[in-house]
Image (cartoon, rainbow, N blue to C red):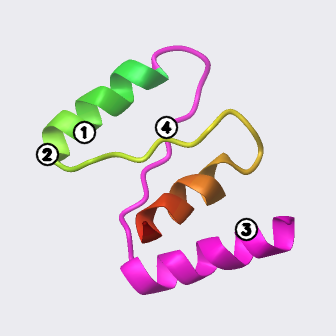
Amino acid sequence: MNWFLNKLARITVWRFEPKIIAVTGSVGKTATVEKIEAVLKHPVFLSERDNRGATRALGRLAR
């Protein structure tokens, strides 16, 4: 399953060339992401709370 998700993420990045911004830390991530979305005026895809979150977020670009 990990192999497939990693392959899907690589293909998605190659095909769509998304701008990727990583927000890390223990406090204030949600507010920061909301502000980024407002400034960019573009939808933001959030990762889920697991070690494959970014891969799954990239997978949603293809939908």
Callout 3–callout 2 Cβ contact below 8 Å? no
Real-space Cα distance between discs 3 and 4? 21 Å
Q: Position of residue 62 (x, y in %)?
A: 45, 71
User: Are the two marked residues, 1 and 2, in contact with CB atoms closer than 8 angstroms?
Assistant: yes
Q: Name the residue under label 2.
A: 41
Tell me what residue is drawn at x 48 percent, y 41 percent.
46
Identify the magenta region.
1-28
Q: Name the residue under label 3.
A: 5
Spatial distance from mark 3 to mark 1, Cα to Cα?
A: 25 Å
The quadrant the C terminus occupies is bottom left
Instruction: Say whether disc 4 or disc 2 marks the residue closer to the N-terminus.
Output: 4
Q: Mark 1 points at which residue?
A: 37
The image position of residue 50, as x and y in percent, is: 75, 38
Q: Which-is-in-front pick, marks 3 and 1? A: 3
- Assess whether residue 24 is covered by the magenta stretch: yes
Residue extending farthest to the top is 27
| Secondary structure state at the residue bearing disc 2 | loop
Mark 3 vs mark 2: give the one in front. Answer: 3
